Image: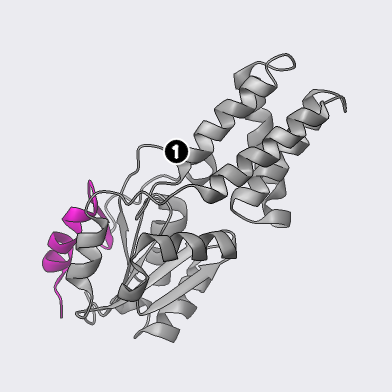
Amino acid sequence: MTGKLTTIGFDADDTLWQNERFFRLTQERFAALLADYADPDHLADRLLAAERRNLGHYGFGIKGFVLSMIETAIEVTDDKVPARVIRELIGAGQDMLKHPIELLPNARETIQALAGDFTLLLITKGDLLDQERKLAQSGLGDLFDGVEIVSDKTASVYGQIFLRHGTGPQEAMMVGNSLKSDVVPVIEAGGWGVHVPHAVTWELEHHEPPLGHLRFREIADLGGLTGVIDEIGRG
């Protein structure tokens, strides 16, 4: 290791609080509404294809998810989807935007334990208003030294963030549930990537773990993070 660990970034959704579970519940509701037109597996494949296709247009988050559901509903019904179904899909999205925050195990305790010893950053992607709402409701906002809501997470984006808020990626760590977004690009940028698996992960966030890489770690939940930091060295 070169340099000391000075900066730690945290993902938000499914790292600090529940998120994907609510997408899955809404997708089950979607399948029930379209049961007369497509079986659940086929519908799920069509929806995933629409989400992948639309990422460049809508980005990540609930609004893009709802628009992709509506687009899929139009496609599988050959433009005959009832207006009531569209109305229910919009309502489902609004329900998701109102859902209370459920912090994951050891989230608050870990952030509190590290605050003051490191520069702590919240680095998340998705809809700006929704992410700001969730952070405010989480009660964790005052513990972070900076908040970055980005359109995507790449090695370049991480490099810029850790230079802007810290001492560069070589002395930074990113903690999150997504190997694709939270771990691999940070390691590519020269930082530490800590994977905290979540029970439910969006298909588009799957990636092979960089096993054997000196800057890759995996922990069962956030309660194991301080041990990783002690092992690496606090500088």
Residue positioned 35% across, 80% down in the render: 145
Assign the C terminus to one quadrant of the image: bottom left
What kind of colouring is applied to the model shown?
one colour
| Residue 155 against residue 17 in the figure, above or below | below
- Which residue is pictured at 26% across the width and 57% down the height? 107
In the picture shown, does residue 75 fall above or below 192? above
Residue 51 makes an appearance in the image: yes
Count of marks placed on residues: 1
Kindly identify the amino acid type of the residue bearing the numbered disc 1: Arg
Figure quadrant of the N terminus: bottom left
Instruction: Tell me if 198 is positioned left or right of 105 in this view.
Output: right
Asked if residue 32 is among those painted magenta in the image, a careful observer would answer: no
Which of 119/153 is in front?
A: 119
Report crowding for label 1: few under 14, some 14 to 19, many 20 or more residues within 10 A (C-alpha): some
Q: Tag 1's secondary structure?
A: helix
Vertical relation: 188 (above or below) 199: below
The percent position of residue 43, horizontal first and vertical second, equals 66, 24
To which quarter of the image does residue 74 belong? Answer: top right
Tell me the residue that label 1 is attached to: 21
The residues colored magenta run 214-235
On screen, residue 205 versus residue 59, left or right, reads left
Q: Where is residue 126 in the image (x, y as percent from the top left)?
A: 56, 58
Q: Which residue is drawn at 70% across and 21% down?
A: 34
Image coordinates of residue 98 in percent, x first then y, are 53, 49
Residue 76 coordinates in the image, percent (x, y): 78, 24
